[in-house]
Image (spheres, grey):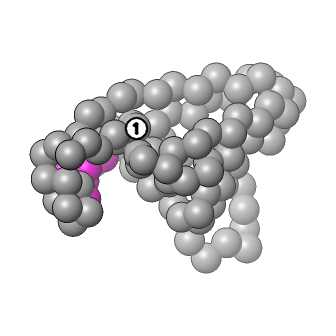
Amino acid sequence: MTVNLALEYIPRRMRELGYGDKYHLRFRHFILQDRETINLKAFNSLFILVEEPARINVKSQNGIFNIALTNADEMQYEHHGQIQIRNTSTSIARARFIQVIPYK
């Protein structure tokens, strides 16, 4: 998903979830060292992946995103809950998200 597509998708998704236009956006750019894993608690927000990183594995209750997998039926760009971002390579890798934080 591109940044432009995500910015078009987010307002519709937030209306679907009942928040209307009551949300904040944060652009998040994670830089992971070799084999590093980052665990995020995102129970009150959504993380929208805005690129297809080659050496990154993202897991959450929504599903997975790992472009290197050949046996997965589907990849998820939207994540929430407990999110694990893992660099599967021995070099630095990057993952860019838009974090959507709703409020009432």
Q: Please check the rendered image and state whether residue 12 is part of the magenta-colored stretch, yes or no.
A: yes
Name the residue at 55% across, 53% down.
81
On the image, the x and y values in percent for residue 44 come to 42, 47
> Does dot 1 land on a helix, a strand or a loop?
strand
Name the residue at 50% across, 33% down.
96
* Total labels drawn: 1
The main secondary structure of the magenta stretch is helix
Q: Residues within 10 Å of mark 1 (few under 14, many from 20)?
A: many
Q: Residue furthest left?
A: 21
Q: Quadrant of residue 98?
A: top left
On the image, the x and y values in percent for residue 6 come to 30, 46
Q: Is residue 75 left or right of residue 8?
A: right
On the image, the x and y values in percent for residue 10 come to 25, 50
Name the residue at 67% across, 72% down.
72
Q: Is residue 27 above or below residue 100?
A: above
Q: Nearer the viewer, residue 102 or 77?
A: 102
Identified by mark 1, the residue type is Gln
Q: Residue furthest front?
A: 104
Q: Nearer the viewer, residue 78 or 45?
A: 45
Name the residue at 39% across, 28% down.
27
Q: Please check the rendered image and state whether residue 64 is part of the magenta-colored stretch, yes or no.
A: no
Range of residues picked out in magenta: 6-13
Q: Quadrant of residue 3?
A: top left
On the image, the x and y values in percent for residue 61 come to 59, 63
Residue under circle 1?
Answer: 99
Q: Is residue 67 left or right of residue 44?
A: right
Q: Is residue 68 above or below residue 7?
A: below
Q: Nearer the viewer, residue 103 or 47?
A: 103
Is residue 26 visible in the rendered image? The answer is yes
Q: Is residue 29 left or right of residue 71?
A: left
